[in-house]
Image (cartoon, helix red, strand yellow):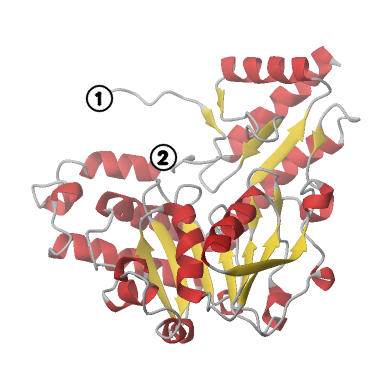
Amino acid sequence: MTTRKSSHNFNAGPAALPPEVLQQVAAELENFDDTGMSIMEHSHRAEPYERVHHEAIATAKRLLGISDDYEVLLLQGGASHQFAMVPYNLLDADQRANYILTGAWSEKAKNEADILGDTYSGGSGKDQAYRRVPDFDTIDAAAEDAYIHVTSNNTIYGTAWQDFARMSEWEAPVVADMSSDIFSRTFPVENFDLIYAGAQKNIGPAGVTVVIISRALLERIKNVNPRVPAILRYDTHADKHSLYHTPPTFAVYMLKNTLHWIEENGGLSAMEARNRQKAQLLYDTIDNSAGFYRGHAHRDSRSDMNVTFTLPTETITNRFLDEAKDMGFSGLNGHRSVGGCRASLYNAVPYESVEALRDFMVSFQRKNQ
């Protein structure tokens, strides 16, 4: 068996996975639960996989404190698939959907909905280069909106909603893309009607998408658009317990194991405290650099998941990234649309890796300023 090479994984997604989970998977890969078969070889209708499937859903509910007023679905296609499923299911012909724009992913979600119906933006940070999330009091929202869509964390720009409390004031259904921060912090699920999240940031590998949807919204969906194909309807998957068709069985197994790891390591409150500590270590380094490092996000909108920053010149930035790679740091390039640097600090990124990055940043500044 080869030894895993030591590296500091700051990739934005697919991202770091807990070593304990990977070790468990390696031990069970050929023989899951003494069945003589890999979990990937079991039928999704057989008891060994069904147990994994329902345990993943039950653990998600425990961690988030999800009441019986909601269904948890395990779907395929990632968040980009949800960009279409949401308006297909929720956007009536005589309504408008309201997209709060906080970055590229919220723009993509709106663009997909534009194909299917009428939309508008009741708030946007685009005129500020997406450096901050719009102030709640500046957002236009109407009870007549088909739904109000937000992106909780913006991986490209390194911004995030700091507080979801006032979203309960909106009268229309609230939909959230939480792909990059779900299970990284506590939040009130009851303030949302639909939440979707690709797993490949905090809770597993690419291939499975968690959808949390209220039963009330599921009832409404049945009357929105009867011509939506069954495979694209949330009520289809809810009625069949996410087993309408073959699910991504290995990804669900990994999801279950990663959620157990979160639970065994203190749950969401512990993840939140540790993630905040990791992010603060880098933000302090940026703030104390006398402008050598410049954070993209405004301080009141900073993300704990994705720390984005630039250096004085493109030449120095490229030198920083080259030297970082040689030192064993992976994934520090900023998104191709904005450049600069980005360190993604998801749940499985250890504090020691962030300390190592902090030390490298301090040393690099000393040599290059």
Q: Is residue 69 left or right of residue 34?
A: right
Q: Find residue 62 and report its horizontal and vertical position in percent.
A: 44, 72
Residue located at (39% from left, 84% from top): 222
Q: Find residue 104 and report its horizontal and vertical position in percent.
A: 64, 48
Residue 19 tag number = 2
Residue located at (49% from left, 40% from top): 15
Residue labelled with disc 1: 1
Among numbered discs 2 and 1, the one appearing first in the sequence: 1
Q: Which one is in front, 119 or 192?
A: 119
Residue located at (37% from left, 72% from top): 228
SS at mark 1 in the image: loop
Q: Is residue 251 left or right of residue 183?
A: left
Q: Amino acid at mark 1?
A: Met
Q: Find residue 97 and report its horizontal and vertical position in percent.
A: 62, 72
Q: Find residue 369 and report its horizontal and vertical position in percent.
A: 86, 16
Residue located at (60% from left, 51% from top): 105
Direction left: furthest residue: 36
Q: Is residue 223 left or right of residue 353?
A: left
Q: Which one is in front, 343 or 76?
A: 76
| Tally of numbered tags | 2
**Marks 2/1: CA distance?**
15 Å
Residue 19's place in the image compared with 207, above or below, is above
Assess disc 2: are there few (<14), some (14-19) or many (≥20) residues with their C-alpha within 10 Å of its C-alpha. Answer: few
Q: Amino acid at mark 2?
A: Pro
SS at mark 2 in the image: helix
